[in-house]
Amino acid sequence: DSGVTQTPKHLITATGQRVTLRCSPRSGDLSVYWYQQSLDQGLQFLIQYYNGEERAKGNILERFSAQQFPDLHSELNLSSLELGDSALYFCASSVAAQGTGYTFGSGTRLTVV
Amino acid sequence: AQSVSQHNHHVILSEAASLELGCNYSYGGTVNLFWYVQYPGQHLQLLLKYFSGDPLVKGIKGFEAEFIKSKFSFNLRKPSVQWSDTAEYFCAVNALKAAGNKLTFGGGTRVLVKP
């Protein structure tokens, strides 16, 4: 157990639907990161939050959004889902906003059918 | 923007063999470097990291990596692998002057250790 908790572990949904992935960072960590892992794209950085504020943005589609709440947990919202959104979505956390490595969660496997 | 390339996509070797995985990055500024391992069905775990100082870094499970700045490389090594080292290995780079703390990952190398 890495200390980063992601729920749910698995999610199967239909195209066009909307889902929410949840992440609780390791105790004491203020930064949360979201990554998408797919066979064709590899590990792609989506977005980083630090203490509730967006800190860096990567290859995140407009159909996707995220936020970090006052208790530091984060949610990644994926809408108008397409087959190509099927992937593993990892959350990670770190203490600082910059210059450190992360601790990863176990991921949410999203299957869009 | 930084990028990371891992030369070998798949490596197959026998137990007790030595392992070396190549990693090159492209970024002209100061970087932090990482190797992560992902065992089948599990999350990514940090093997080792380089921030500054001695370019030869020792990590967990007997792994080490050498940072060669002139070659923009951060190769991972293990002198004698075990069957339990079967996993996918990812090199990652953090560009310190970039906004935020984004890690850019290489495409990964799948390592299969035959007993």
Image (tube, helix red, strand yellow):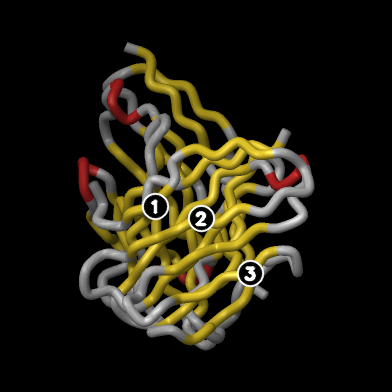
Question: Of all residues shown, which one is farthest toward the top?
Answer: B115
Q: Quadrant of residue B20?
A: top left
Q: Amino acid under label 1?
A: Gln
Label 3, label 2: how many angstroms apart (C-alpha)?
A: 11 Å
Q: Which chain does the residue under circle 3 lie in?
A: A
Q: Is residue B13 left or right of residue B108?
A: left
Whether callout 1 and callout 2 share a subunit is answered yes
Residue holding disc 3: A65
Q: Earlier in the sequence, mark 3 or mark 2?
A: 2
Residue B11 appears left or right of A94: right
Cα–Cα gap, marks 1 and 2: 7 Å
Question: Crowdedness of circle 2 by 10 Å Cα count: few (<14), some, many (20+)?
Answer: many
Q: Residue at horizontal 61%, vertical 53%? A: A19
Which disc, if any, is residue B93? none
User: Which numbered tag is attached to residue A21?
Assistant: 2
Q: Secondary structure at mark 1?
A: strand
